[in-house]
Image (cartoon, rainbow, N blue to C red):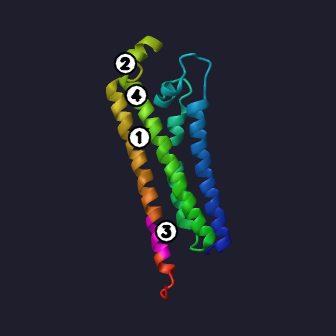
Amino acid sequence: MQLATRHRSAVAAVLLACAAIYIAVAVSQWLFGLGLDPRDDTLSRAAGIGFTDEARRTLFSILPVALPALAAFLAPATRPGRVIGRLTRLVYVAYLVIGVLLAMSAARYGFDDVRQLDEEGQVFIDPRAAVERLLLDAVWLALAVIGLVSTRWSGSRERSATADPSS
């Protein structure tokens, strides 16, 4: 059973909104999720070291990466579908910007053993663990780049398929 164009647009818009909410919650957890511990700051939250460490798990997960791609796939070739395609690319760009900032903040914290010793009294994330996390974050970011490129490619393919041959 095929969905009508209006229903496909609605489902795609809901999927895209869910992805955007997921990304916004991750940003909120990272930047504004202050705990009661005075050592809790944006770098330690980015590194995910036991205070309010949900931002990494929220952002670097399958939903914010897959939902925009699914929305772009479901979006029809009509005007609402093209708008959803543009919004999908915007969501992927937001994911990439936030993801790079979060990954770099976590890496910065992980490579700063002296600061960890001064502030926490022990090293929570050593440089080896920081490199491992950075590599895993890079995989998630690469998946988002693939999603961005695939939506851009499908959008240009749709435009060329619907272009007026007389122009």
Question: Is label 4 in contact with label 3 (beta carbons under 8 Å)?
Answer: no
In this picture, is 142 found above or below 80? above
- The Cα–Cα distance between marks 4 and 3, rounded to whole angstroms, is 37 Å
Q: Earlier in the sequence, mark 3 or mark 2?
A: 2
Q: Which residue is mark 4?
A: 108
Q: Which residue is mark 2?
A: 113
Q: Earlier in the sequence, mark 2 or mark 4?
A: 4
Q: In front of the other: label 3 or label 2? A: 3
Q: Quadrant of the N terminus?
A: bottom right
Q: Amino acid at mark 3?
A: Gly
Provide the major secondary structure of the magenta segment. helix
- Residue 29 in the image: state x and y as whole percent: 59, 33
Local secondary structure at mark 4: helix
Disc 4 packing (10 Å; few <14; some 14–19; many ≥20): some
Q: Which residue is mark 3?
A: 155
Question: Is label 2 in contact with label 4 (beta carbons under 8 Å)?
Answer: no
Mark sitting on residue 137: 1
Q: At x 44% / y 31%, what residue is drawn?
A: 105
Q: Amino acid at mark 1?
A: Asp
Left/right of residue 38 with respect to residue 138 in the rendered view: right
- The Cα–Cα distance between marks 2 and 1, rounded to whole angstroms, is 20 Å
Question: Is label 3 in contact with label 1 (beta carbons under 8 Å)?
Answer: no
Q: Earlier in the sequence, mark 2 or mark 1?
A: 2
Q: How many marks?
A: 4
